[in-house]
Image: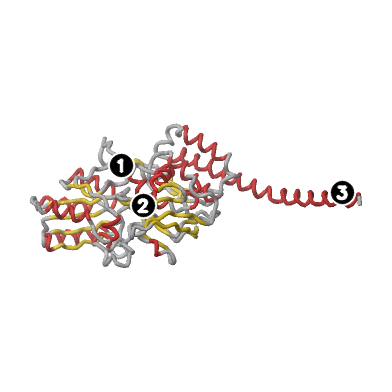
Amino acid sequence: MLITRVLVPVLFVLKLTSLTYSQAPQINERVKGWAEDIDFLLAEIGKQHYIYKAKPMPQLLVNDAGALKTQIARFSDERMLAELQRLISLVGDGHSYVLPWGAGRVHSTCLPVRLYLFSDGLFIIDAQPGYEQWIGSRVARVGKVDAAEAMSRIGAMISRDNSMSMKWIGPILLSFRGDLEAIGIAPVSDTLALSLVDPGGRQREASFPFVPVPRMRGLPKLVPSRLPNAGGPPLYLSNVPANFWFQELPDEHAMYFQFNQVANADNERLGAYAQRLDAALTTRPPHLLIIDVRHNNGGNADLLPPLLEVLKKFERGNSRAKMVVITGRNTFSAAQIFINLMNRETKAIFAGEPSSSKPNFVGEENEIVFPYSGAMGSVSNRYHESLPGDKREWIEPQIKVELSSRDYFAGRDPILDAVLRRAAR
């Protein structure tokens, strides 16, 4: 009996010890791997970033990187991915980032709904199958945190040139589990509760699962209202996937030109399209030319000169005509260079809300892939100064209009309406 009493505890201890030692290499490998990714990020910033390849990195970035290494064992992989993004945001530009999806070792998840910040609050504008009933609902709380506070917290996770990026990117990041963990809203869990106010004004609590991230190519652009009673999409949401298109507005003696990407289309180069636009403007010169870049988050600025020449030619040949450029939070990067040149070289006025780039900015897509996690990101290595000496945060619109949820879900465009009213005076 004495032997039995001794052997059972000893065998139990040996079994636990065996499990501990078999798991330890995996745990140690993970900690070592993420630490290697942190070091890799600092090295790439020091080697490539336009500013920090020539001067010391911000001390806060160095300190936070060191502190993050001590927390690796406690944080989930999804949170570690978010924390890498928090680190790179400290370099202070909108083109240096770490994506919250697409990392080889990280199974990224998100809520099955898409959020958007309107002038009157944070709303669900789209949903994966099975969750469509929540479209149109205002988000009052994310978990136990007020929606406004959640937006404020997510600001610390965003790479940005100015504060408009928080409106643009913040609602998107608020759906990712890693980011929600990082800002203290969602502990490691399979679901998250949202407090919602539906279109009828009823307050409701709903629990949403975290699901695999759908295929994404860049940040999603605004979609038409998904409410059943919305009717057809307004003009500005009627063809967002097209890189560029135009349409006459005969009743307004206006031409509406939507420029959604500084890139060639699959079937037409931007330069060739500019010539078609020129022909239309020459054949029937409008009293008002509206250039809408609300959905344009950039591309290749080297493609811009032919288009700019067409627009300047129109202005020179039609001294009484007006040009209005509509900008928004999604206007970014090469699109910012476009509006800079319109601001500098034409008499166009601006409408809508500000862009998410400064007129002069550090910005260039320069891909990096992390050695352990396989995370993907960018370190900016170029400075764009198309308006020498300009220190503005953005080009301030003269016709300031914000989009409300009421107008959006009803399929109205208050910005275009305001432009047309102004032109009619």
Q: Amino acid at mark 3?
A: Val
Could you tell me if the residues under marks 2 and 3 are in contact, i.e. CB atoms within 8 Å?
no
Q: Amino acid at mark 1?
A: Lys
Closer to the camera in the image, 180 or 350 = 180
Q: In the rendered image of this protein, does residue 335 appear above or below residue 411?
A: above
Disc on the earlier residue, 2 or 1: 2
Residue lying furthest left:
320
Q: How many marks?
A: 3
Q: Is residue 281 left or right of residue 162?
A: left
| Colour setup of the view | secondary structure
Name the disc covering residue 358, or none. Answer: 1
Closer to the camera in the image, 209 or 365 = 209
Q: In the rendered image of this protein, does residue 359 appear above or below residue 19?
A: above
Q: Estimate the x, y position of residue 329 in percent, counting from the top left.
A: 31, 49
The residues tagged by marks 3 and 1 sit, at their Cα atoms, a distance apart of: 73 Å
Q: Is residue 70 left or right of residue 258?
A: right
Residue at 23% from the left image edge and 51% from the top image edge: 326
Closer to the camera in the image, 178 or 23 = 178
Q: Amino acid at mark 2?
A: Leu
Disc on the earlier residue, 2 or 3: 3
Residue 152 figure quarter: top left
Closer to the camera in the image, 157 or 316 = 157
Name the disc covering residue 419, or none. Answer: none
The residues tagged by marks 2 and 1 sit, at their Cα atoms, a distance apart of: 25 Å
Disc 2: which residue: 122
Q: Estimate the x, y position of residue 375 in percent, counting from the top left.
A: 50, 51
